[in-house]
Amino acid sequence: MADAMDIDVLGPRGIKRKAEDNRPVPDAPKRIKALAQDVVNKIAAGEIIVAPMHALKELIENAVDAGSTSLEIVVKDGGLKLLQITDNGHGINKDDMTILCERFTTSKLKAFEDLTSIGTYGFRGEALASISHIAHLTVTTKTADSSCAWRAHYSDGKLVPAKPGQSAEPKPTAGRGGTQITVEDLFYNIRQRQKAFKSHSEEYAKILDVVGRYAVHCEGVAFSCKKHGDSVMGISISASATTVDRIRQIHGSAVASELVRFDVSDDKWGFHASGWTSNANYHVKKTTLLLFINHRAVESSAIRKAIDHTYAAFLPKGGHPFTYLSLDIDPTRVDVNVHPTKREVNFLNEDEIIESVCAAISAQLSKVDTSRTFMT
């Protein structure tokens, strides 16, 4: 039967090609180009100033570095529309105002080696420069030997006139000793960042958290913070307030009434730690840790976990403490330049130092454990 059937013999359907023949012809490699300086500056500014709270943190640290004993902070729209800080510090020399907002202009460093012994909050000279690239910045300042205050406006790191057609040079004005820095329209030229902030109230709460941390730590310095146009202060701390008083005013009497002090140092590891922590009568659902390393507010998951572990023997399951810890470490043992916002630091012998701090806290908790009260 097969012989009777007509069978078409199909020839090859195509020509088999090598795999490399199927590859698309690549475009010529793109040339590497240097970014425009304006783009570089905006990228750097966006890394350092992530939110209004970061701008304020930098400004607070600059004010305290300048020897201020009083800081007044005014905020509008969560700091996006207005962020103003007024201090009574040393002020800025008029001759320095020309380069004030240029990147890496600072009074705190001369050589890279100085980073190994830096003892001030700021050191890179990037804060005001960064702010000037993403906001409208005005600085009014008066030194003790100046007969008047001087006011200058900045944009993209440079002096700019207050109004078109006017001179950009600083102008004499009435003012008290110290410096007032006014930041307006933060992120006005980075719309995506600006749109990311959904709630002005949430940003204001973060600002109050930053102010509250430094208000607890900076004994001898008065702090006030309020919304623009409000008569009621969000935070108001007098210069004479003790650390416990500051904690009471910011975090409440419930925790302030249950605090114990701890203090420990060790020359071998080059540190001194002191602070206040809640006793076994107080506990909340989430740990509150106010951590300062060499007087800079930072975060440390290792320290937080170690403190929680220490309290596990004293608090009921799910209970967490309040701890304010000021850790002074030999500057040669600390690297403060590991994070753009200086939020994190690295230091030598971290495990040994944390163990010593937790042992000191545990010893204090054991002393007062006999007075522990229970609700029945």
Image (cartoon, rainbow, N blue to C red):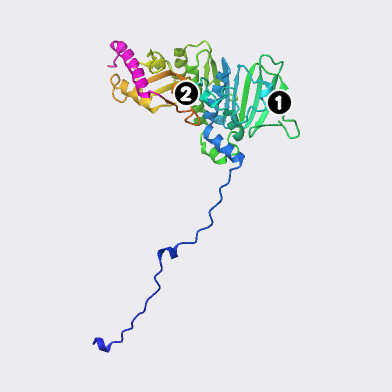
| Residue 235: % across, % down | 52, 20
In this picture, residue 184 sits left or right of residue 172: left
Q: Secondary structure at mark 2?
A: strand
To which quarter of the image does residue 293 belong?
top left
Q: 80 above or below 365? A: below
Secondary structure of the magenta portion, mostly?
A: helix
User: For the residue marked with disc 1, what is the amino acid?
Assistant: Pro
Q: In the rendered image, which residue does mark 1 sit on?
A: 170
Separation (CA) of disc 1 from disc 2? 33 Å
Quadrant in the rendering for residue 66: top right
Kind of element beneath mark 1: loop
Q: Residue at x 34, y 15 (%)?
A: 360
Tell me which segment is drawn in magenta. Answer: 348-375
Q: Is residue 142 left or right of residue 375?
A: right
Work out whether mark 1 precedes mark 2 in sequence or the reverse, and give the earlier one.
1
Please name the residue shown 38% across and 28% down the image: 301
> Would you say the residues marked 1 and 2 are in contact, meaning their CB atoms lie under 8 Å apart?
no
Tell me if residue 27 is in the magenta stretch: no
Asked whether the viewer can see residue 241, the reply is: yes
- Residue underneath mark 2: 297
Q: Residues within 10 Å of mark 2 (few under 14, many from 20)?
A: many
Q: Residue at x 39, y 17 (%)?
A: 255
User: Where is 26 relative to 221, above or below?
Assistant: below
Q: Nearer the viewer, residue 325 or 328?
A: 328
As rendered, which of 362 and 286 lies closer to the eye? 362
